[in-house]
Image (cartoon, coloured by chain):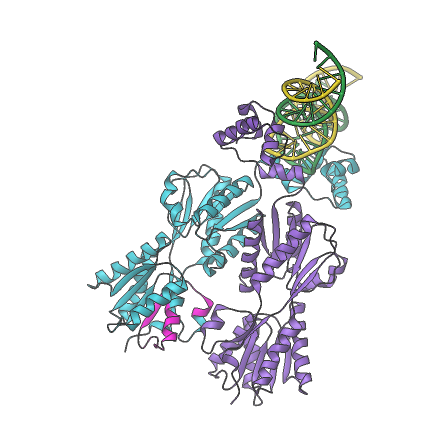
Chain colours: A cyan, B purple, C yellow, D green
Amino acid sequence: MTSIKDVAKAAGVSTATVSRVLANKPPIRPETRERVMAAIAQLNYRPNLVARSLRAQKSAKIGLVVSDIRNPFFTAIGRAVEDAAYEQGYSVLMCNTDENPEKEMLYLNLLHDENVSGIIFSPTHQFSLQAGDFHFDIPTVIIDRLVHNKEADMVLLDNVSAAYELTEHLLANGYRKIAGLFGDASATGQERHQGFVNALRDHGLTPFSAEFVSPRIRSGFSAATALLQNADKPDAIFTSNSMLTAGVFQAAREFKIRIPDEFALVGFDVTEWGEFVDPPITVIAQPTEEIGRTATELLFQRLSNPNRSARTMVLKGNLLKRGSSTAKR
Amino acid sequence: MTSIKDVAKAAGVSTATVSRVLANKPPIRPETRERVMAAIAQLNYRPNLVARSLRAQKSAKIGLVVSDIRNPFFTAIGRAVEDAAYEQGYSVLMCNTDENPEKEMLYLNLLHDENVSGIIFSPTHQFSLQAGDFHFDIPTVIIDRLVHNKEADMVLLDNVSAAYELTEHLLANGYRKIAGLFGDASATGQERHQGFVNALRDHGLTPFSAEFVSPRIRSGFSAATALLQNADKPDAIFTSNSMLTAGVFQAAREFKIRIPDEFALVGFDVTEWGEFVDPPITVIAQPTEEIGRTATELLFQRLSNPNRSARTMVLKGNLLKRGSSTAKR
DNA sequence: GATGATTTTGTAAACGATTACTTTCCTTGA
DNA sequence: TCAAGGAAAGTAATCGTTTACAAAATCATC
């Protein structure tokens, strides 16, 4: 392992000089600088980031803590964060919590111990409940899920409006008996429920039904099965996340119930399958790319200005009207 | 920041003793040990991993270098690697190369500079070509793509057999005019082409056509469009990766060509959309979970025994026969 | 050419852990 | 009671950087 000492020796200067050349910190005589550069090139020297991080008490790394990277929503965000970080010369440590508060705490500690400069974090429901008491000693941007904490920046979707708009779309297309399925693992489901109920209320209606279930395909499948096998069926199903949408879709196929002829289906988040199936599914598209990028930028802003007061950015979803919810006949 | 010195002072011992307690390294008098533990708990002390890593010249981190984490194949592998690493107390640094050799080199260097203990790595095509000359100074496990290098362990799919089996399935179901579309970005496409050709040859046939194109949906779409609008059409299309499969599927839908009535479609890799569309797509399922886990285990084996000679594990794909390739009528 | 100001470089102390090597403290046996 | 030997704890060097501070070199001015 060649270290800065070797370079210093080879160039006939002190380690301090080498360090200054590396950091491009004047004053350095051009001549010396060249001598050092030559030695670096010749020895193929690369600075040791660990040592640098120890000395500087920080590192060019940020942590990304999400529930599961296999969720396409988080995959997309992860990618956007990585790209934005890369542009600034930072790298990303990805952590999956599986909605498990213990794993979450473990990773938060790990990131701390690794001297990461900042954290982008989608907290579990349990964390959100106590977030007010939590002290973030590392700059942190919360994404996707609202928490009440003065210290952290946030990037969120306007879930209430998005759900409202999605519900209104169903109403505009003539659907009236609308059932709602909402995830129970985060506050997101509750906000979307709120928008759903608001829209119906503003049109003088009440939900055909509204259930909170665990955000998994299986739960969506069972709930839909129950709804659709009843004599009194809904004419539309509103789902608050793509797992539930998938479950409902599978139930429809299993029981050969045609969409949208027998019932309309709408949900959240762009997925590949949702575009490829026939009919494709109407959804609220979250601007994942923008969320990831914005969160990362917010983080870098805070890194360069630690005293700036916390900001919350609320982004709008984008309604993609597709075949699963065409006008009722 | 509380350091080991603070703990030592609080417990009335030297830093060496604290370190020994932490590492659980006898000899330590039970009484002292307890005093130290108490101080640790009271000060809420957490060892600084950066300092530890600098001193030990290694870290409990491994790097994962893949082309794009948004590719479901790599997402699944990433998740499996993370889980396996987590069990050993390791964390994972994920890097996307976008098939770009420069980015790849940059990340390989970064991982080196971060003192990662090992690397799991899916190399670009360009890297593979020169891999023989490359010296891995960090234990490395290559996945997905064959390279010729004595130093690295490898976990691969038996692509030739898998493609052979997939082609035979088409033949068994009565298809004869089979076109092949293969990715040109890695050796994987070539191996699958090999299996494809072998199977046809062993049945006295030749490909209806065989093209190497860039592994993107768009390429699949154009290639399929050209194939299907010709007067002399294939009765089946074999694709070597899921991007191409998607492109072909979209082309079929765009031009209202029915699968499998007008042509059968088969490919590689499990995707959500491939299961959800009607008919679902016949594919070779790669054991992603197993690939990730095996690679990680191989890495840990090497970490504990650096002299062990390099191993290559070849895993079998699993043919999932589905609606897109039912017997020809 | 001496003086002081300015530019350039070097010295050495951190950062927070680990660990070879010493030192101190007990036991034990004669 | 003392010596020897082992157990327990301490001292200080080390990992590879960065950076106050000190020192040296350079330059301009009179």
Task: Please name the residue shown 43% across and 47% down the image.
Answer: A101
List x then y, in percent, for residue D21: 64, 22
The C terminus of chain A lies in which quarter of the figure? bottom left
Q: Taking the image as drawn, is residue A283 in sight?
A: no
Question: In the rendered view, does B119 fall on the left or right side of D2?
Answer: left
List x then y, in percent, for residue B241: 58, 71
Q: Taking the image as drawn, is residue B249 in sight?
A: yes
List x then y, in percent, for residue B104: 65, 56
Question: In the rendered view, does A10 fall on the left or right side of A197?
Answer: right
The N terminus of chain A lies in which quarter of the figure? top right
A320 above or below A153?
below
A39 above or below D13?
below
On the image, which quarter does residue A26 sit in? Answer: top right
Total marks placed: 0
In the rendered structure, does residue A254 fall within the stretch colored magenta? Answer: yes
B275 above or below A81?
below
Q: Which residues are magenta?
A: A248-274
In the rendered structure, does residue A275 fall within the stretch colored magenta? Answer: no
Task: Please name the residue shown 52% across and 47% down the image.
Answer: A63
Nearer to me, A197 or A12:
A197
On the image, which quarter does residue B114 sit in? Answer: top right
Nearer to me, A65 or B125:
A65
Nearer to me, A198 or B35:
B35
List x then y, in percent, for residue A302: 47, 42
Question: In the rendered view, does B305 fall on the left or right side of A307?
Answer: right
Task: Please name the residue shown 54% across and 72% down the image.
Answer: B218
